[in-house]
């Protein structure tokens, strides 16, 4: 409940701000839009009912949501082990039927295939940084790593990822 | 390139992959959240525990496409139009027990929103237990609350207030017994009560953590919460482990230790009673942390210190010794803490440890030790082995006192929880959900309670009058099934196939009660794998083995039809359906029926465009089955081709509708259905009351696993087929039609696992049928028009799974957190 000194939070605005970040976090984690939607729903449903705890601390609420999201992702992998082999990803990409989306989807499938070859921790860092749009400081707060460690790990990972990406296009 | 440019460049690179969620999805989810809000407001207004909430959507939503329902509800709730129709149940336990099961209306589309929770059977999955320091009380943490029992005979003392319906994962008493603390999973909080007045002293909100254990300090003024901080990079779900320390009275966080190491395979953590040290076992090493400094002070590799794989740790009451179980060596090693911290080489530690043999390593199957307990003065230490035993030694001499055999050896299950009285002369154990108290010195059993469970029942079988119910497990092998006599004033379960009574009965597979409520058919699997079909007499409890039945198979299932005749399936063997009837002398006579295809065992599957041989698979199996209300049809999943590995037991399966009397194939449903693990992912089936509609809950889309030679389920759902052509084929063999239409309804569920469970209500309203579908979280009720295929949601029961209606349609059984719930609509 609101207290007298706290401005009213527009939770619907928070929802619209969080939704694409969560969705893209899960896309980077799972490589699949439908799964990302499911996991986004699960996370939102869990977080939403307890959001009033964070009435005066919207930043903490968002951090908490992504903590839940990380756990939901872990749960998902534990239950389904949905690791898609590299070849399968290309097969999936070639099956997408919406014409104008094909190239974009293929690129994302290629990216995801490369992401799945990274260690789990680096995959998650990428998803938090570029899927969820977090700053290094926020990533650090969410993962428990130091900010400098996050920066270093991301720098190394992306450098390697981009080199491979560009190589695969040559 | 400087850092800023780098960042920007990287951001640009990833931006090209960014995608917004679809507007439909976004709106739908927002609508659901608004519904959730409305529900929460109602719950607060009615002070009902969230676990017991029920959504009532009313008939106003009928006829509306399901996908629009959530959005419609949001609008309605926003305007508070439906607030009054969105009722909740004030269903505390005391009220539930007052509702009679005798005067109920059949549950139908007309009254489904009036359903109430009438009874709770059992006390849920057992997660932790503690003996009060004054030795008067055993407190049990379960999936449905904290139950207090007399330590003398386990008689009921009550439920800790505020825990009803809550899943409790850990509890503890303070040393002086004046306080009790419990960890509530759903509300993510720790509650501390005054154990005399049962008043709440403190509530501590946790978030993003999984408490393993709670420990008061010596003064009782502080509480340590040992926990796993969620979200690690490993897949165990535990990122870092550590402890949070709170002041009991203010709830203030006074200290925090996060062991910022990726403790893969964490198996145990403990704090010394003087609160100076934390010990973790994970990834094959023992780690010791200083509580005051928050620093790790030792990491000891297992092979040097233990001669085996360390599994569980515990400190002695005076904090001077550390006991560690060593799995592969079947031993407990006790280290002097001072030595452990100061000796230079790990080899010296090994030499100096006291080794207590839990069991001979040569004895098959006895390796892991899950619990270590000291009595109050440290003169006795206890460990559970992996074979139903608790071993007790005296200290410091390390002499074996006794092995209390809680369950028979070579049977599944272990003593999952253990608590010890202060003198160490009595223990309370939990094995397969049974709470038992023993005298340590002579192994005599002092008390026994069957009310708890080891997991959530997911298979129900009612007698026709709904007054007897058998609960068991469809997906997992259990050691026992429960028989509930619902006519009794106090409902306690009778165990079917209890290995603690009959050591020759290791497992029970699917158990079903006959319509008369007089017999339960089940198959009992011995420790060596022999299957024996059995009939349990409900009135006497006698068990009759069916003659000449002893299979060396992995699974078998027994069912009754509406004539009280029993028929059975053996899995992994052949296509025989055994049909047993009783003659005039009440002897069971076997009449076998062979499943057939149109040309012997072979038929051509039109959709698969291939010839299917129903017997050619090395892991041939027929399961599960459903029989139509007239007893004429049987539907089964037939494994037609095992692939990759028979050990993993995957197979490509097809659904068939068969003539129950002759075994002739009548319809092959146009679907290839992979069952990636027959034991874990069985489909469920249900016939509509008129028999013309078949519902099948199953995986719908698959993908190949990367790291295993099997397929995994990507999405699940329910499909409905019109099978009326099978009746025509019964009457006229020439009409056998293998190319029936596609399913006319497909309902997706949110998560692939567990597979959806389906049940038709036996009450049909004109052309509309009511279908209950349970996913991972809820049971949803649909109004399905069997002509148009349109369906709408008419009710949701949150947090409950595995629906089954009684044959008279007056009761609905659901389960959650190890508890069986009975729902119905009372007259008036």
Image (cartoon, coloured by chain):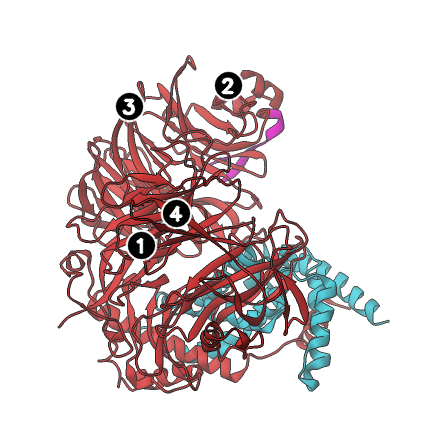
Chain colours: A cyan, B red
Chain identity of mark 2: B
Q: Is residue B23 magenta?
A: no
Percent from the top left, x then y, of residue B515?
Answer: 29, 57
Circle 1 SS class: loop
* Image quadrant assignment for residue B508: top left
Q: Is residue B296 magenta?
A: yes
Marks 3/4: CA–CA distance: 42 Å
According to the picture, the residue beneath numbered tag 1 turns out to be B514
- Of badges 1 and 4, the one in the foreground is 4
The residue furthest right is: A170
The residue furthest front is: B584
Chain identity of mark 4: B
According to the picture, the residue beneath numbered tag 4 turns out to be B589
Circle 2 SS class: strand
Marks 1/3: CA–CA distance: 37 Å
According to the picture, the residue beneath numbered tag 2 turns out to be B355
Marks 1/4: CA–CA distance: 17 Å
B394 versus A160 height, above or below: above
* Disc 3 with disc 4 on a shared chain: yes
Name the N-terminal-most of marks 3 and 2.
2
- Of badges 3 and 2, the one in the foreground is 3
Q: Which residues are magenta?
A: B288-304
According to the picture, the residue beneath numbered tag 3 turns out to be B444
B151 or B555: which is nearer to us? B555
Q: Residue B668 vs residue B104: left or right?
A: right
């Amino acid at each position: 409940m609101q207290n007298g000194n706290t401005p009213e939070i527009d939770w619907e605005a928070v929802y619209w701000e969080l939704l694409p970040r969560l969705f893209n976090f899960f896309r980077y984690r799972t490589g699949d839009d439908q799964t990302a939607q499911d996991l986004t729903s699960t996370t939102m449903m869990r977080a939403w009912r307890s959001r009033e705890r964070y009435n005066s601390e919207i930043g903490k609420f968002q951090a908490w949501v992504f903590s839940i999201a990380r756990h939901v992702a872990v749960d998902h992998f534990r239950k389904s082990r949905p690791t898609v082999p590299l070849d399968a990803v290309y097969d999936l990409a070639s099956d997408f039927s919406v014409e104008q989306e094909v190239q974009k989807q293929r690129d994302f499938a290629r990216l995801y295939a490369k992401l799945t070859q990274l260690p789990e921790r680096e995959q998650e860092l990428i998803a938090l940084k570029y899927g969820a749009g977090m700053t290094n400081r926020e990533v650090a707060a969410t993962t428990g790593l130091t900010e400098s460690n996050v920066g270093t790990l991301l720098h190394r990972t992306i450098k390697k990822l981009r080199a491979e990406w560009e190589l695969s296009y040559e | 390139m400087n850092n800023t440019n780098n960042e920007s460049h990287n951001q640009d690179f990833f931006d090209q992959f960014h995608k917004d969620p679809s507007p439909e999805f976004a709106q739908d989810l927002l609508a659901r959240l608004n519904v959730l809000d409305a529900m929460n407001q109602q719950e607060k207004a009615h002070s009902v525990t969230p676990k017991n909430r029920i959504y009532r959507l009313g008939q106003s939503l009928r006829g509306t496409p399901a996908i629009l329902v959530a959005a419609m509800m949001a609008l309605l709730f926003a305007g508070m139009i439906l607030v009054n129709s969105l009722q909740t149940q004030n269903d505390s336990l005391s009220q539930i027990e007052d509702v009679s099961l005798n005067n109920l209306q059949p549950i139908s589309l007309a009254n489904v929103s009036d359903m109430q929770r009438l009874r709770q059977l059992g006390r849920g999955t057992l997660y932790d237990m503690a003996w009060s320091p004054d030795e008067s009380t055993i407190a049990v943490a379960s999936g449905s609350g904290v139950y207090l029992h007399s330590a003398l005979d386990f008689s009921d003392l009550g439920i800790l207030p505020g825990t009803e319906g809550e899943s409790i994962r850990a509890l503890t008493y303070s040393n002086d017994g004046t306080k009790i603390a419990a960890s509530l999973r759903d509300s993510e909080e720790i509650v501390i009560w005054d154990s005399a007045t049962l008043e709440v002293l403190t509530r501590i909100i946790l978030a993003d953590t999984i408490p393993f254990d709670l420990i008061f300090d010596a003064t009782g003024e502080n509480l340590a919460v040992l926990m796993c901080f969620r979200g690690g990079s490993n897949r165990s779900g535990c990122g870092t482990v550590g402890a949070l320390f709170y002041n009991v009275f203010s709830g203030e966080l006074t200290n925090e230790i996060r062991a910022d190491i990726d403790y893969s395979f964490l198996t145990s953590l403990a704090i010394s009673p003087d609160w100076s040290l934390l010990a973790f076992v994970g990834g094959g090493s023992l780690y010791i942390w200083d509580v005051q400094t928050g620093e790790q002070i030792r990491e000891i590799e297992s092979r040097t210190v233990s001669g085996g794989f360390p599994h569980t740790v515990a400190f002695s009451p005076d904090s001077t010794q550390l006991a560690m179980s060593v799995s592969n060596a079947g031993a407990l090693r006790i280290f002097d803490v001072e030595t452990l911290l100061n000796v230079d080489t790990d080899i010296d530690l090994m030499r100096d440890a006291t080794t207590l043999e839990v069991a001979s390593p040569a004895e098959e199957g006895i390796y892991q030790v899950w619990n270590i307990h000291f009595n109050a003065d440290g003169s006795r230490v206890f460990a559970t082995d992996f074979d139903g035993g608790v071993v007790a030694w005296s200290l410091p001499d390390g002499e074996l006192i006794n092995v209390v055999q809680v369950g028979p050896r070579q049977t599944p299950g272990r003593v999952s929880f253990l608590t010890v009285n202060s003198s160490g002369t009595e223990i309370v154990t939990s094995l397969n959900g049974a709470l038992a108290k023993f005298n340590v010195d002579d192994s005599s059993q002092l008390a026994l309670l069957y009310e708890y469970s080891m997991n959530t029942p997911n298979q129900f079988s009612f007698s026709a009058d709904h007054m007897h119910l058998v609960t068991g497990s469809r997906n997992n092998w259990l050691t026992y099934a429960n028989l509930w006599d619902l006519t009794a004033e106090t409902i306690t379960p009778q165990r079917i196939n209890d290995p603690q009574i009959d050591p020759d009965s290791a497992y029970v597979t699917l158990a079903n009660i006959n319509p008369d409520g007089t017999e339960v058919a089940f198959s009992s699997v011995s420790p060596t794998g022999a299957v024996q079909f059995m009939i349990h007499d409900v009135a006497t409890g006698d068990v009759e083995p069916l003659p000449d039945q002893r299979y060396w198979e992995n699974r078998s299932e027994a069912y009754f039809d509406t004539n009280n005749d029993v028929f059975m399936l053996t899995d992994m063997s052949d296509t025989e359906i055994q049909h047993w009837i009783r003659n005039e002398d009440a002897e069971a006579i076997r009449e076998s029926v062979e499943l057939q295809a149109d040309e012997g065992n072979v038929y051509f599957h039109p959709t698969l465009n291939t010839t299917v041989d129903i017997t050619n698979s090395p892991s041939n199996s027929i399961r599960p089955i459903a029989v139509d209300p007239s007893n004429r049809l049987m539907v089964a999943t037939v494994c037609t081709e095992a692939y990759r590995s028979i050990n993993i037991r995957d197979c490509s399966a097809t659904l068939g509708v068969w003539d129950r009397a002759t075994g002739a194939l009548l319809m092959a449903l146009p679907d290839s259905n992979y069952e990636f693990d027959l034991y874990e992912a069985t489909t469920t089936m249900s016939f509509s009351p008129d028999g013309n509609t078949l519902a099948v809950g199953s995986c719908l889309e698959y993908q190949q696993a990367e790291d295993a030679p099997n397929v995994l389920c990507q999405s699940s759902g329910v499909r409905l087929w019109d099978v009326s052509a099978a009746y025509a084929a019964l009457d006229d063999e020439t009409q056998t039609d293998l190319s029936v239409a596609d399913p006319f309804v497909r309902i997706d569920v949110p998560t692939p696992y567990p597979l959806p469970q389906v049940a038709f209500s036996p009450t049909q309203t004109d052309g509309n049928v009511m279908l209950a579908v349970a996913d991972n979280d809820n049971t949803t009720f649909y109004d399905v028009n069997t002509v148009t295929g349109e369906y709408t949601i008419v009710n949701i029961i949150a947090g409950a799974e595995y629906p089954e209606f009684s044959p008279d349609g007056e009761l609905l059984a659901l389960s959650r957190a190890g508890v069986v719930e009975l729902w119905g609509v009372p007259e008036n």
